[in-house]
Amino acid sequence: MRARGERKEAGSWVKFRLLMWKNFVQQLRHPVQTAAELLLPVLTMSLVLVLRSQIDPEVLETRTYPPIPAHTLNYSVTVLGGMNLTRMSMAFSPENAVLRDVVSSATTKLLLKNMRDQVLPIIEALPIEIPPGLVNSSQVYEIVKLFVDENVVTGYNSSAAMRGIYAEEEATRRVIAGIEFDDSLREITELPLDLSYALRFPERPRLNSFFMTGGRTWRTDNVFPMFEVPGPRFPYSWEGGNDPGYVNEMFIALQHMISSELVSKVAGVNLDFDVHIQRYPHPAYIMDLAKEALQFLFPSFIMISFSYTAINIIRSVTVEKEMQLKETMKIMGLPTWLHWMAWFFKQFIYLLIASVLILVILKVNWFTTEEGFSDYAVFTNTPWTVLFFFLTLYLTCTIFFCFMISGFFSKASTAALFGGVIWFLTYIPAFLLAMDVNMSTSLQAVTCLMLNSAMSYGFQLLLARESTGGMQWGDFMTSPATDS
């Protein structure tokens, strides 16, 4: 029988409730801070609503494209205008009479076909005098080929020697491309049946290096854009656009003429007919420019929404360490894990309230347009459960991130300062990726360990999927691409 006055030791549940009471009392003693933590997400999401309200979705009909000649340089007029065509050169390797004849013939046919099509930069650049009254096409071909062989085509002894041709800016404006055959073909007297070649263009597409338009790279490492949107790429471009611009940069024309000439000489047949290329038609689709804009802006709004809360969590936890309250509670018998758990659940409840407010703003159908779109929201198609799940994961990681930062500092002001800086720094990889900075897949995977970058990638995928039916629970392992 327990003696009178003997006290029963409080269990973990009682201690946990006591710590939760203490944390909530501290929070409620700062009403302005509490209101700011709840209202800042509402304010930033209201800005998203303003953006959403200014851009209405639009239904676009099936888009078809006419065929264009594979040899045409008509879409390369801008690039040709930035080049020194009076000193035009076509490089190849290795130097060999058979290979020189292939390159000279292909270049001649490319020039003649485009002269026939009235591509003005080509006509004006070639100082070729054709005798008046000469109507025999084979004679014209021989005259032009002689000029090309003597003045345009330049051979190099090896592929290694040719690869340095674009080291200087002047060569970029003069040398159209380099055709690289295998160095083992240096001594051949006839073309083998099995051969390959590579086209060497400048590292940066000329549209970008000359005029700062189009893509900065050839994107040979990408099959699809990182984040696809509904509709065709460059919907108003017959040739497929300028990023990377294989038609505009003359890659397709040169590849077609070299390949045709090789087949013609190996097979012994005349392939002097026009081949056309044509973009695939695209079915009717909904164009929503707001979704494209939000792919880049929405993650930054989310990061800003919880930046104040994150800094306050770091400061509040570090204050207890600075004032020795945590050590005092440990002396009183409160285990460390219970202390952290109480802090986690208190912050999680407040952040959960904020996430519910955000969810309401994002999922309520606020808008209707005159074109027939009714009851659409920021996330019209994605279920609220998916959004809530992702937001909850993000907020949970936010709390643990704040706990981690607080462990490195003993002064609250210092912890809050560095915590805020680190909070924004974790968004930089996602920002760079959105600005088209090249990153390897492994490096992107590493940046996912950074809280706000991972959040940005996730919302970009959610918004990309939103345009094609929304991210459903069964779609987590599928691509948001429209062709997948």
Image (cartoon, rainbow, N blue to C red):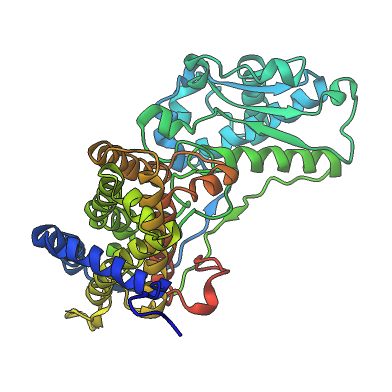
Above or below, comparing residue 448 to residue 206 in the picture? below
Which image quarter: residue 102?
top right
| Front residue of this view, candidates 238 and 317 | 317
Residue at 77% of width from left, 38% of height from top? 262
Front-lying residue, 362 or 2: 2
Give the residue furthest to the left. 32
Residue 134: x and y in percent read 58, 29
Q: Decide if residue 75 is on the left or right side of residue 17.
A: right
Q: Is residue 83 left or right of residue 167?
A: left
39 to 131, vertically: above or below: below
Task: State the residue at coordinates (49%, 53%).
Answer: 226
Coordinates of residue 179 in the picture (x, y in percent): 69, 29
- Identify the residue at image location x=28%, y=78%: 363
Front position in the image: 226 or 39: 39
Expressed as whole percent of the image width and height from the top left, the position of residue 125 reads 46, 23
**x and y, in percent, of residue 16 in the image:** 36, 70
Please state, as top left, top right, bottom left or bottom right, where the C terminus lies in the image: bottom right
Q: Is residue 229 visible?
A: no
| Depth order, front residue of 157/415 | 415
Number of numbered discs:
0
Q: Residue at x 53, y 20 (%)?
A: 88
Q: Is residue 275 visible?
A: yes
